[in-house]
Amino acid sequence: MNSELPEILQFFGRLHTVVLHLPIGILILASILEMASRFKAYEKLKPAIPFVLFWGMIAAIITAGFGYLLSQEGGYDGDAIWNHKWLGIATAVVSIGIYFFRNSKNLYLALLTGGVILLGLTGHTGGSLTHGSEFLFEPFEDKDSKAVFVGNIKEVKVFNQLIRPIFKSKCNSCHNSGKVKGGLILTDTIAIKKGGDNGVLFIAQQAENSLLLQRIHLPEEVDEHMPPKGKKQLSDEEIKLLQWWISGKAEFVKTVADYPSDPEIEALLKDKFIKKKSGIATVKISPVSSSKIESIHKQGLKVFPLGNESPWLEARLSDRKQLRKSDFKTIQKVAENITILDLGNTSLDKNLIQNINNFPNLSKLFLDQTNIDDETFQKINPLPYLEYLNLYACDISDQSIEHLKKFKELKSLYLWQTKISDEGINDLKNTFPKLNIINGKEMLATFANAQLRPPKIKSDSTMFTNQITVNLDLRFPWAKIFYTLDGSAPDSTSLLYADSILISKTTTIKTIAKADGWKDSKIAEETFISVKKRAKKITINTPPNSTYNGNGEGEKILSDLRLGTTNFKDGKWLAWQGKSVSAIMDFGTPTEMSSVFVSALDNNGSWIFFPKGIKVWTSDNGKNYKQVATKQFPTPTEQNPASLRKIETAFEKTTTRFLKVQIDNLGKNPAWHPSPGQPSWLFVDEILIR
Amino acid sequence: MLLNRRAFLSKTSIGLGTAALSSLLGVGCFKKDSSGALSIDPENIKIPHFAPKAKRIIYLFQSGGPSQLDLFDYKPLLDKMRGQDLPESIRKGQRLTGMTSGQTNFPLANSIFDFKQYGQSGAWFSELMPYTAQIADDLCIVKSMYTEAINHDPAITFFQTGSQQTGRPSMGSWLSYGLGSANENLPTFCVLVSRGTGRPDGQPLYSRLWGNGFLHSLHQGVVFRSGVDPVLYLQDPKGIDKVTRRKMLDQISSLNQKQIDEFGDPEISTRIAQYEMAYRMQTSVPEIMDISKENQQTYKMYGPDAMVPGTYAANCLLARRLIEKDVKFVQLYHMGWDQHADLPLALRGQTNDVDQATAALITDLKQRGLLDETLVIWGGEFGRTNYSQGALTNTNYGRDHHPRSFTIFMAGGGIKPGTTYGETDDFGYNIVENPVHVHDFQATVLHLLGMDHEKLTYKYQGRRFRLTDVHGKVVKDILA
């Protein structure tokens, strides 16, 4: 149809929706002038009326003409367009009549009155064409009362109750018998089956080929997408329903029972048809003005709207240790709107409690950590909408059970650290099987086997020359710390730790923490080595890597009795990459010794390995050395967790001044390593003798 | 007079009324009235877009990338295919970090730990999470998280700010901006940091992670440290008493007020508000940090570590104390989850740190009736690979960063408890069901707090910014 119309005329046709406002405005202005000029004050307006009528006539004719052009474009059909067209033409004709008969008094007045009525009718029919016939009166519809609830979702009529409402709300404004965009009508079943200009909408059980679903699923930017961009889009739920309908029988009379069952759809239907609103959701209330809330804020009280779209307020009075009657008075100005009232941890008492009764719409009430007892609690009337009641740490006992039962809508009840007994809770549970009671006791079972942490054994070092102070640290006042110094496992008969322990010979400390109601800690142990003789001077033949040179101290740190940690960057390590090192230790005077400790680090992920071997020489003069021990270690075959080790190499007891220790680097990362063949690291922090 | 552009623009807008301006810019919710008493500033009330499910958040951020395959995402196929190379049909060209890009093969590594199902929901947990497993029915476990970043800092920044590039406001700052404060004595956004025993020398955290970006400085996170000085620069120096401090603040305030009258720069009123907040925090912070009144039962739940300031357990307990005082967003960071090597040992350390305290926190909130208003989130910035970084041995392996799938869990405010959402393939490498992008996660969190992530915007440098950039979809399936 539209191909017959030249583009320029299509353009004018579409201007109809713009120019149509002119005749409405001008002709109404004319009638206002006509009435006003009958009063003395406005008499002088009279000469203007013919001028206004003239332009009103011109505007009406142009509008009608453009409207006709628009109607030729197609997409509109049926009664509605017929009505609108002829009403429009009639308006134009009448406006001509008004202008030319403006001097014949009665006819003129009749035509003017008729013209205004015609304008109204034409405007309304036109509006219905564009926005749908229900547009104007929609705000008055009560949506809740329209909701239908059924006993069984299987009885829901698929087309009438599920599909038709979707078409109605999202499609019918353009696809109705009045406005037939794309030749498609979605208001009656025969027309739905027939489809539109582009063919049928669907074939039952072939959702994947459905034109209807294709159009819905196209990206919104595509012109063919439906509903068109800018119009209200289908919700995910609605799309799911349509898909399910078409995948099923896609017919018009059957019920849900005849369609394939689908858990998602069923849940959705339950929501829609079974879950009746109850409790606070049924209460209708109008929002309070922001000035009212502001006046409450000025008193320093926290009352906030729940959200922009909600008329409900929450009042947070928690932590007020000087709660006053006037506080309640202040928030009572908006009492009906307050649905959450937080009085937790306040000085709420028997004199104040009655104020709660002034808030009829409470759904959530916090009374936790207050001094209210059974007697005080009785003073709260059974609030009809209360769903949440928090009595945590209140002095409430089984005497309050009967009163609690009067709160019929209660869904969550918090009774942790109250005096309510298990029987009392069972009683409540029997009365309200769905009530969620949190008494907290059973949750403690989760933590019944909580274990103490072992005491931390704290000291400056694990090596010392004369003596060392050791502290056992737990930071847990309810526990006792027991320990032994003889290597035996500690228990409650062992030494009780009170103050720091002084150690003067090589000792292993074992310690355990114990407390009533707790699982004993694991045993912690540490060996403290007495080092009587230290090298006066250590020299090494290979300088360490400049990044790991003991914070610049170099070989001096090899006998400072300060051990490094598994954190190789802690500054207490000397390290060599790909290279071995030998150290000459000068004890100043001949010293008795029988073994040497090399304290080293292993952290394979960071290419750090324990040494491959250790060789030991002795000398009396620092020139002639005699080899006294050699030790080789197997190359590791797999990656180990990072660890520290004091590698002891023993030799025959001897008295000597100089000791040379060669520590062999593994050299290259082993074949199994992520970076095989790369030069590996050797980390050493102490070399000591026994 | 010399005026820079910003000051000029602020000055010219004085006609609008500085109060209105500061409200637009989101300066604090509380102000002092003429009598000196503190009252809520009606100009600055923030209302959520819709009634929220959760009023507060505790975000237990596990920094470093916990291994989902050793904690939550049980994959029997890896037991069977242990040591075999990861098939290219699964890897599909996934980029690698510099740490494994040189690796010639990618031996699939099953978990060394035993898995079992817990609760009515039958959620899987490994033996490393015995306490959290006990509260499985309170949790919503999302196994199909994915992110775009592959290295720590971009990935954490992405989670926190919605952008891998630095400079955007943190999630807590967005919420502070959107929801305002509910406690005039404490910051809206508090941060607590702890080091993990699993890898004590792991990645650092940058304070910009809790920064306010282009939002007002009022919205930045305030770090509570362990030790004598929980909030830096808060205590009066020696020799300054309360009266002197008060006088000084009043003087500064009157000078600042003069500046406002002249220039109208809203940042000055923020400054006044911050000084006042700090003054009040001199009392409120010591109260929060004073855990001496907590009873032994509390420590039995949180574990004795909760007595040691600076530990994760102590921070969990502090988080509960802050939430009780209506702080909107408490962000914990626990470091040390970066198990490239020595995973079996290190992960044991990490889970020892967090497992009991996490379960305790959720239980504690539940007992006190706070959980249904508080959203608790536990998770890291990405997951870990299903193949071993470095050699795979009988007792040891490591795992590299894996952005394509990982697990987080949530509990409380508005979340469907006792659910597991999303699924990965049998290799634990790709998501096969219900993927949740970081922006989806952020949109969902905002939704739970009553904010529409598309509407919570801030105009800066000529365009409106969002936490979720131009992405994000609320994951409706996990909402209660």
Image: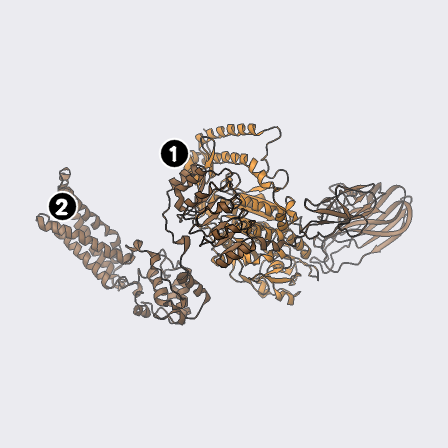
Chain colours: A brown, B orange
- Residue B28 position, x and y percent, is 47, 39
Q: Which residue is mark 1?
A: B15
- Badge 1: residue crowd in 10 Å (few <14, some 14–19, many ≥20): few
Closer-to-camera residue (B159/B195): B195
Residue B460 seen in render: no
Q: Position of residue A366 (x, y in %)?
A: 49, 47
Identified at 59% across, 45% down, the residue is: B318
Figure quadrant of the N terminus of chain A: bottom left
Q: Nearer the viewer, residue B293 or A576?
A: B293
Instruction: List the residue tagged with mark 2.
Output: A50
Q: Residue at x 43, y 71 (%)?
A: A260
Counting labels gives: 2
Chain of the residue that carries numbered disc 2 in the rendered image? A
Q: CA distance from mark 1 to mark 2?
A: 48 Å
At label 2, which amino acid type do we have? Pro
Q: Nearer the viewer, mark 1 or mark 2?
A: 1
In screen coordinates, is A25 left or right of A201?
left
A85 over A576 or under it: above or below = below
Task: Give the quadrant of residue B321.
Answer: top right
Kindly state the secondary structure of the residue where label 2 is placed: helix
Does residue A287 appear to the left or right of A117 in the view shown? Answer: right
Amino acid bearing label 1: Gly
**Nearer to the camera, B257 or B34:** B34
